Image (cartoon, helix red, strand yellow):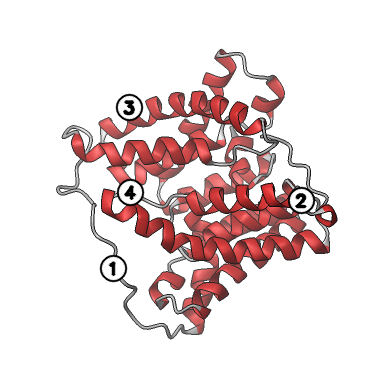
Amino acid sequence: MLRGQAQVTFLPSALAGAVFCLALAAAGWQYALYALAGTAVGTATARLLGVDRDRVGTGLEGFNACLTALCLAVFLGARHLSTALLAVAGCVVVTVVTAAVVRLLGTWGLPSLTLPYCLVASAMTLAAPGFRRVWHHGEGLAALPGPATGTTAVQPAELARGFFAGFAEIFFMPQWYVGALLLLGLLLADRRAAGVACLGGAVGLATAWALGAPAERIADGTAGYNSVLVALALCGVFLPARPATLAYALVGAGAASVAGPAVAALCAPSGGHTFTWPFVLTTLVFLAGAKSFPRLGGSPDPA
C-alpha cells in the first residue's frame, strides 16, 4: 500500500509512501484515509484478479487507485457516503482500465503512467453533476474558457510557495507545506529523483512566468505539478539518467507547463478537470520521440 502511494512519483519506496501519507494527513485526515483506502482497494483487486505479484508488490497496481479515490474526495466532498462508495467502485474499475491500458500501450513499448486514473476520474467527475445523490455542489462546472486575467508580477514569497505547492498539487492539495513534506519523502527515497523533480518544477514555473501566466496560477502550484512528473519520467525512470536525458526532460517539463492551460481550455466547456492529462500526453509524446534519438538511449519498460 505504501509503495503504491509512492509510485505516484515513480518510487517503489514504502518510506516515501509513509511520508506522503503524513503529508496528506497534514492537509486533512480524510484525504490520507481516502488515499490509503484507494490504494488498498486497487491493490487487493489486482491480487484477486491474479495480476503478476511483482507488479502488485512494487505498488504498480496501487497508484492509479490512490489518485482516483483522492480526486473524488476532493471534487465530490470527502464527508459524503456517496463519495466513499463511488471511490471504492472507481478503484475497482481503474484496476481493470489499468490492465487494458498496459496491454494497449505495451504494444508500442510505452508505459501506462496515470492514464487509467485520468480516464476514470474524468468520466466520473463529468458524470457526477447528472446524479443528485452524488453531486453536492449545486450547478455544474461547465464554462466557456476565457483569457487569463490578473497580474503577472510574482513576488518572491509567491514563487517559493508555488514551487512547493507544485509538489502538493500532484495530490490535489494547494498547501505549500504539504508539498514540502512530499519533497522530503522524495529526498529520503532518492536524492537524484528529488533533484530532477525540483528542476522540473522550476522549469515549469519559469515557463509559465515567461509566457505571462497570472501570479495566482504560479503561486497555487498548478503551473508546475505536471512538469515535476514529466521531468521524473523522462530522466531516470523511463529513460536513463544522463545529461542528455536531463536536458530532454526539462524541455518536456516546459512543454507540460504550456499544455496545462490548453487541456484546461478543452475541458472547461464540459466542466472537466485537467488532472494529470498534460503530464500523460507530454510524456507519451516525448517517450515515443525518444525512440528516434539514439543519444537518448530510450527503451521504456511498460508499467
The residue at which mark 1 appears reads as 146
Disc nearer the start of the sequence (3/1): 3
Q: Place residue 81 in its image quadrant.
A: top left
Disc nearer the start of the sequence (4/2): 4
The amino acid sitting under disc 1 is: Gly
The amino acid sitting under disc 4 is: Gly
Query: Where is residue 46 drawn, in percent x and y?
Result: 56, 20
Marks 1 and 2 in Cβ contact (< 8 Å): no
Marks 3 and 1 in Cβ contact (< 8 Å): no
Q: CA distance from mark 3 to mark 4?
A: 21 Å
Disc nearer the start of the sequence (3/4): 3
Which of 12/205 is in front? 205
Q: CA distance from mark 1 to mark 4?
A: 15 Å
Disc ID at residue 272 = 4
The residue at which mark 3 appears reads as 85
Instruction: Give neighbour class at mark 3: few <14, some 14-19, many 20+ (Cα, 10 Å).
Output: few
Q: Is residue 178 above or below residue 103?
A: below
Q: Is residue 94 above or below residue 251?
A: above
* Left or right: residue 2 compared with residue 161: right
Disc ID at residue 292 = 2
Instruction: Give neighbour class at mark 4: few <14, some 14-19, many 20+ (Cα, 10 Å).
Output: many
Residue 248 in sight here: yes
* Left or right: residue 177 compared with residue 184: left
